[in-house]
Amino acid sequence: MNELPYFDNEGVKIHYEIEGNGPDLIMIHGFASNIENNWREDNWIKSLKDQNRLILIDCRGHGLSDKPKDPTQYGIKMIEDISKLMNHLSIKKSNIFGYSMGARLALNFLLDNPQYTNSVILGGFTLLSENAQEIRQIYEPIIKAFKVGSITQVKDPIGLELRRFAEKVGNDLNALAAVLAGFFVESNKDLVTRVKMNRLLKKIMVPVLIVVGSADAFVSDIRNENSIVNQIPGASYFQIQGKDHYTVVADPKFHMVVKAFLNFVNNK
């Protein structure tokens, strides 16, 4: 049996896979998901591998990567994992596709490393409030939902939905609690609120595609004047009617628009 491919980031082993041929596309899954669940089961690998070299990463705390229980091992370190993976594979520049949590990581990677980014696809994503306390009030019940002994003890509706999904996928619940808590470690909180985010978004020069389901409870009204769509110059936006945060991932229209976007980016 071949040994699974990993790279090391300061003692934390990160699992990755490579599929297909063509321009590089780094793919970053959502919270409580993994390569298998987010990308293979929903046919993304099959859909994209003929025209792209897919670089798929199991984020730390997920899948076959290490799962530290210390919140300080997440946050900014999850962005560093993307850079380390590119260095490990000698990739100078890449397209990046993130879904949900993966989209937040992809956007922050772009803001910090525009020179390494050809384009970015943000799925199931919207900007959060710049008020850290408001965001903490949303996240704390979700973190608690992963720490209690039984799902029957979870009262928060979003926490219940995420806990149910996490158990279905077979996650380490304590590691996932640490992933979420990691965004509120002092050194990491800027990943969520990004001081002067609007100013940063207006400086983005690479093509950006944003795709959401119209029934996604995790995404606020992305069409308002302060939304990410209206802050990034030339950003493309596609909404898939009737799909929520989970059902949109496998939708053929999502696949179609991503393939068209990548074809444009890779051939312009």
Image (cartoon, rainbow, N blue to C red):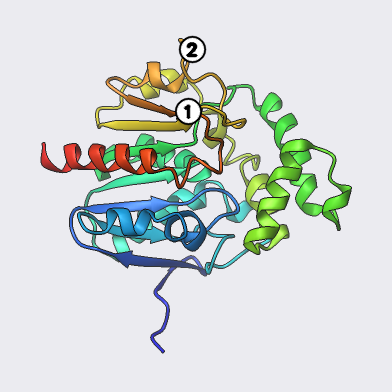
Q: Position of residue 103 (x, y in %)?
A: 45, 40
At 61% from the left edge and 42% from the top edge, which residue is drawn? 183
Q: Is residue 103 above or below residue 14?
A: above
At 48% from the left edge and 12% from the top edge, which residue is drawn? 224
Outermost residue on the bottom side: it is 1
Q: Position of residue 114 (x, y in %)?
A: 29, 37
Q: Is residue 91 above or below residue 218?
A: below
Could you say whether the residue bearing mark 2 is in a helix, strand or loop?
loop
Q: Which mark is first along the chain, 2 or 1?
A: 2
The three-letter code of the residue at mark 1 reads Gln
Q: Is residue 129 above or below residue 12?
A: above
Quarter of the image for the C terminus: give it.
top left
In the visual, does 114 lie left or right of 166? left
Which residue is identified by label 2?
A: 224
- 10 Å crowding of disc 1: few (<14), some (14-19), many (20+): few
Front one among 61 and 244 = 244
Quarter of the image for the N terminus: give it.
bottom left
Q: Nearer the viewer, mark 1 or mark 2?
A: 1
Could you say whether the residue bearing mark 1 is in a helix, strand or loop?
loop
At 43% from the left edge and 43% from the top edge, which residue is drawn? 251
Which residue is identified by label 1?
A: 241
At 25% from the left edge and 63% from the top edge, which residue is drawn? 20
Q: Position of residue 137 (x, y in %)?
A: 75, 30
- 10 Å crowding of disc 2: few (<14), some (14-19), many (20+): few
Can you see residue 235?
A: yes
Q: Is residue 62 above or below residue 193?
A: below
The three-letter code of the residue at mark 2 reads Asn
Front one among 169 and 88 = 169
Q: What is the CA distance from the residue labelled 1 to the residue labelled 2?
A: 18 Å
Outermost residue on the left side: it is 268
